[in-house]
Amino acid sequence: MKRIRIIHKTEYHYNEPVTFGQHRALMRPREGHDVHIGSSTLIGPHTHVNGATVGKGCFVATGASLFPGARLGDGVEVRIRGVVQVNSWLDDGAIVPIHWVAVGSPAKILPPDRHEEIWAIQRDLNFAGTVYGVERGTPMEELMRKQSAFYQAHDGDEPAPTN
């Protein structure tokens, strides 16, 4: 029997068939960013789909991270440990190579050693506002209080029934 565990009282929008890897994949919405998974899509183990939209026929490999506001067109591949940054959009058929980063809208796909180039695009994508609901430069103490409250709100959540 195949199972999916849903936490954080999340609503997932997808049409069959969607394949989730054998091992844990974290999928959760963020305020203003639901999770949408297109049909005939494979979500690999240990992936992180956080408030992202994934088109039809996509392959999201082991350890990939899709941040809030990320949008993958149809047939996109995000290979092992690839990253699609906040508010970044990939056109149909795009490929994010192993360990590479897609950033911007439309996304520029860069190797991780090009940090300065990635940051030049990412700094205007509002990571802190999109992910944590705070302004860039907010003290970490305030950000962590907010994040702790987010998790505390789900303290009593129960896994969805699997039968």
Image (cartoon, rainbow, N blue to C red):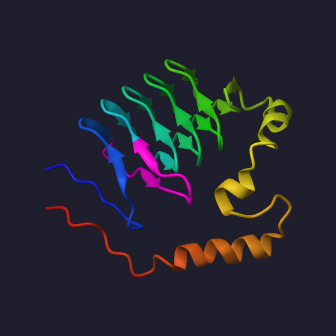
Image point (52%, 39%), residue name = 64
Is 109 drawn above or below residue 139 in the view shown? above
25 part of magenta stretch: yes
Q: Is residue 132 visible?
A: yes
The image position of residue 130, as x and y in percent, is 67, 54
The image position of residue 119, as x and y in percent, is 82, 38
The image position of residue 108, as x and y in percent, is 70, 25
Q: Is residue 45 visible?
A: no
Is 94 drawn above or below residue 138 in the view shown? above
Is 127 drawn above or below residue 60 in the view shown? below
Q: Is residue 23 left or right of residue 86?
A: left
Image point (66%, 32%), residue name = 101
- Where does the C terminus fall, quadrant-wise? bottom left
Q: Which residues are magenta?
A: 21-36
Q: Quadrant of residue 138?
A: bottom right
Is 22 drawn above or below residue 133 in the view shown? above
Image point (42%, 67%), residue name = 8
| Prevailing secondary structure class for the magenta stretch in the rendered image | loop
